[in-house]
């Protein structure tokens, strides 16, 4: 398998046509080797337009979703990031490449251990990995300039945007199957938020995602 040709095809045939045009993001996708964050049995699928199984019923995002998310956040070198769900560590690495520091919280201990080894091998010193449930936020290091939720949310809990600093951005996929909205929530000032629907997609729900109140008849 010609890895560099496959990487080029991923960027040019999947990602760029999906309105990812930020050259900094595109350059990063060539530089950061996605295949080294994919579980060994699926390494040949590292550049395919699909979600890759990780275990526990979880998966890596598709390459185009990763790229579109990172582009939408317009990360800066001083940004403090909260990632809810570490997974394979690849999105963590993308975020850490462009931000100041990433605090990533993962509920599955084995994911955390494997992601730590991958991130260390790639020399990332600006990532802190923690075990826990951040489905309603993670107060330990709040407020954050950026929050990324890696599983879908049936509803957006107030507690997540509340942990944004003024000017902060939150990326999450919100709603129920079959149609969910990728949303970018911006904190205009403390307690004042602006929400923008970016595109439709579908994503497995976050473990312990807050549920809307359902009427029972």
Image (spheres, rainbow, N blue to C red):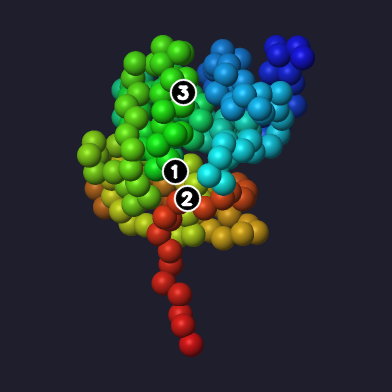
Q: In this view, does 85 lie above or below 40?
A: below
Mark 1 highlights which residue?
149
Callout 1–callout 2 Cβ contact below 8 Å: yes
Residue at the image position 66 percent from the left and 24 percent from the top: 43
Callout 3–callout 2 Cβ contact below 8 Å: no
How far, Cα to Cα, is label 1 from label 2? Answer: 8 Å
Pick whichever of labels 3 and 2 is earlier in the sequence.
3
Q: Where is residue 182 in the image (x, y as percent from the top left)?
A: 54, 47
How far, Cα to Cα, is label 3 from label 2? Answer: 20 Å
Pick whichever of labels 3 and 1 is earlier in the sequence.
3
Residue at the image position 49 percent from the left and 59 percent from the top: 154
Mark 2 highlights which residue?
206
Pick whichever of labels 1 and 2 is earlier in the sequence.
1
Q: Where is residue 203 in the image (x, y as percent from the top left)?
A: 58, 49
Mark 3 highlights which residue?
93
Mark 2 crowd level (few <14, some 14–19, many ≥20, 10 Å Cα): some
């Amino acid at each position: 398998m010609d890895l560099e040709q496959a990487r080029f095809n991923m960027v040019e045939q999947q990602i760029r046509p999906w309105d990812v045009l930020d050259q900094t993001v595109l350059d990063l996708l060539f530089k950061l080797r996605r295949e080294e964050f994919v579980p060994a049995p699926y390494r040949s699928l590292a550049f395919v337009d699909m979600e890759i199984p990780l275990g526990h019923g979880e998966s890596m995002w598709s390459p185009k979703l990763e790229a579109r998310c990172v582009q939408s956040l317009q990360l800066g070198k001083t940004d403090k990031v909260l990632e809810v769900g570490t997974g394979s560590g690849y999105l963590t690495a993308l975020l850490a490449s462009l931000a100041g520091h990433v605090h990533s919280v993962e509920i599955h201990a084995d994911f955390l251990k494997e992601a730590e080894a991958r991130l260390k091998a790639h020399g990332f010193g600006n990532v802190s990995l923690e075990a826990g449930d951040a489905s309603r936020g993670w107060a330990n290091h709040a407020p954050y300039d950026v929050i990324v939720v890696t599983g879908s949310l049936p509803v957006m809990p107030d507690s997540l945007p509340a942990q944004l600093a003024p000017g902060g951005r939150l990326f999450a996929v919100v709603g129920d199957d079959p149609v969910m909205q990728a949303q970018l929530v911006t904190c205009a000032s403390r307690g004042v938020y602006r929400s923008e629907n970016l595109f439709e997609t579908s994503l497995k729900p976050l473990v312990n995602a807050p549920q809307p109140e359902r009427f029972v008849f």
